[in-house]
Image: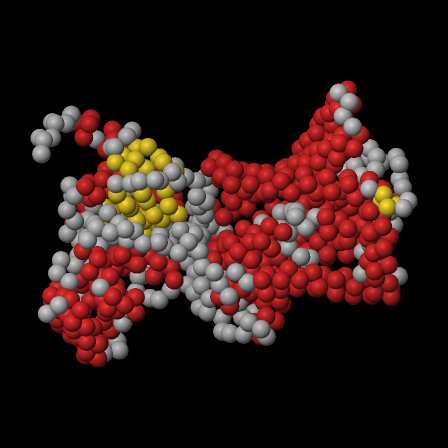
Amino acid sequence: MNTKTSAIDVLNTATELRWEVGEGFHDTLMEAIYTDAAQIADRVVTPSGQHKRFDLDRTIDRLVTGRWTGFPLMLLLLALVLWLTVEGANVPSGMLASFLLDTIHPILKSFSAGIGVPWWLDGLLLDGVYLALAWVISVMLPPMAIFFPMFTLLEDFGYLPRVAFNLDNLFKKAGAHGKQALTMSMGFGCNAAGIVATRVIDSPRERLIAIITNNFSLCNGRWPTQILIATIFIGGLVSPGLAGLASAATVVGVAVLGIMLTFVISWSLSHTVLKGEASAFSLELPPYRPPRFLQTLYTSLIDRTIFVLWRAIVFAAPAGAVIWLISNIHVGNLSLAEWFINGSNPFAILFGLNGVILLAYLIAIPANEIVVPTILMLTVMATGMSDFGAGTGVMFELDSDSETANVLKAGGWTLLTGINLMLFSLMHNPCSTTIYTIYKETGSAKWTAVSALLPLILGFVLCFFVAQIWRLFT
Amino acid sequence: MTAEKPQTACEACPAHHAGNLTRLGINMTNWDYVIALAGNPNTGKSTVFNNLTGLRQHTGNWPGKTVTRAEGGFAYENKRYKIVDLPGTYSLLSTSLDEEVARDFILFGRPDVTVIVADATRLERNLNLVIQVLEITDRAVICLNLIDEARRHGLTIDDRRLARDLGVPVVPTAARSGDGIPQLLQHIQEVATGKWVCKPHRIKNEPPTLKNALNRLVSKLEAAFPGLPNVRWVALRLLEGDLRIIEAVKSGELGSLMQPNILPQIPKQEVIA
């Protein structure tokens, strides 16, 4: 008998026996395995009488996944993390900014003047590229160095699966996968990372939903924008003592709006183009483990903070050059930037935004982090203010939020512009890295386009309605 | 064969050999042994992996966080080991992608040693997977991880008894703090080099009909593929109607399991839509 015929013989016997064993085969086998496991475990494990630790876990779980306490605790934790980030990042941010911008920049300028660098090269490199980098470092490094380790500590402690547990029911109702709660949380750090994380979702349909809606998680590049605008426009509305709280609450509000949008869009997708049942999965709530502070600090600094910062730097450098160029290349008597701003203003006003914001978002497609500095620089230029910053097309950091507020208000900004900028920052196309990641993960140009355009259109629609309603009442 | 040098107590101690561990990170060009790392989700597989390779794959306290396959290497006592971190699964019997990747690697990749990371605080549930892995492979080491946590919960685990019941080495570890890693390395080496011959546990509680069917199929398989190392498992999969295995029987790929072979490629990532 040769191998070929005996192989067929094996298969035939298997088919025959499958009938004999019957349908319950899988269950029978599992039962046998479970019995074996139980017997062995029973022999080798001796529990002690006391279960103190276990009870502590249960008590915490009852609180953080409770019907009434789960959600408020989640929001409180988010607010606390944000508040610590806002408060803690201010001082080091200011120090970095004054060092890089007020100390190093003049030294570089006088050095380049000393060796006779042509004005355009000096402008492109020092006023464009260098200032963009300095701004990104001073604005991004401190909040990231605080936000990421705190987030990682929560993750290490075991809180993330509880978040998933709390949100699972809502995701199920939205026709999406419960694990989307985890990828959504990852998106709060970085959308590109969140999209890679959707690989934990087996079903392609649910994974696509998770990918498309991940952009509604405010990412690291957008937190600083939200925080700054909230501080200026919302914090300014209340007494100084409450300003910090009010701004943190506003940012939490925007983040929650993003979460709500995630549900709404997931629901719409799963009831239209991506129809299907939500698949079940078992989520294990791991025991709480004391976080390892030093290691967490190390890995979150290296893996996340430096990684994200590096990416921002790589994208900010060319963007700085572009900003300098478009504000210094003149066609007729206006620079390219002014042409665009003036041209798009009537359109942008409809949406409660302005041409500066639109241009800033075009320039910032590679990295959301540079939106605010771009806006400030363009505003100064468009309003012809001369007492701020160092000159045309120069990215700069203002010494205080109130100075920033003065610039924006001089540029015609109102509370409406501030609110709509926050909304638009939540809902617009993802950054180019994220778009590329989506393409890599889905392998589909169509779904990549949907993921990029859907939030953008939503953003315009929402801003339009807010602006129209606002104008009705004021 | 040269006679072994008599060892001093110090040299025989695993801690001594830990000094011979060189972490190679992802720098793997050629290797002497292949190690597969299997286990339930969230048992600390990635921590063990990082501990052995010196890599810093991100770890987190939530199940399913390893979404990409990770590979790394280390050298121990002049041998180079390649280590493959498989996706965490609760079982190897269902149809999800994770489980397929894990069981195909253990079966067709034929690692020299499969290290099964088990959570000491949830031993019974973890044993379900251990038993399934032991059906596939003869060469395994149990890494009884989170032993510190188990002790904190007041659990005492008789690891010697466990090793006897399972027929493979059992090493209690607390990978987060690096406890037990030297002993783990020692046992990996012993199993890889054949110094320790495993007599792995086989499922005992199957009902007679199943047992008879299995025996009949096993004898057929043994006739068709003499020397096949994991006949019982293949028979189980055939009874289950696993298409991948049926295909392997048809194409004769199953026969190649008897020869030294090349590692199959695990898909690095799935492209959807």
- Residue A331 horizontal side relative to residue A363, left or right: right
Q: Residue at x 82, y 54 (%)?
A: A354
Indicate the quadrant where residue B172 lies: top left
- Residue A261 horizontal side relative to residue A280, left or right: right
Residue A84 visible in rendering: no
Position in image of residue A410 (x %, y %): 88, 45
Position in image of residue B199 (x %, y %): 15, 52
Quadrant location, the C terminus of chain A: bottom right
Q: Residue at x 12, y 27 (%)?
A: B5
Q: How many marks?
A: 0
Q: Residue at x 81, y 50 (%)?
A: A356
Indicate the quadrant where residue A260 lies: bottom right
- Residue A143 horizontal side relative to residue A44, left or right: right
Q: Is residue B75 above or below residue A30?
A: above
Position in image of residue B106 (x %, y %): 28, 55
Residue A450 visible in rendering: yes
Of residue A190 and residue A449, the one placed in the foreground of this image is: A449
The residue sitting at the top extreme is: A114
Q: Residue at x 32, y 37 (%)?
A: B74
Of residue A7 and residue A423, the one placed in the foreground of this image is: A7
Q: Is residue B148 above or below residue A44?
A: above
Position in image of residue B271 (x %, y %): 47, 60
Quadrant location, the N terminus of chain A: bottom left
Of residue A368 and residue B125, the one placed in the foreground of this image is: A368
Q: How is the image coloured?
A: secondary structure
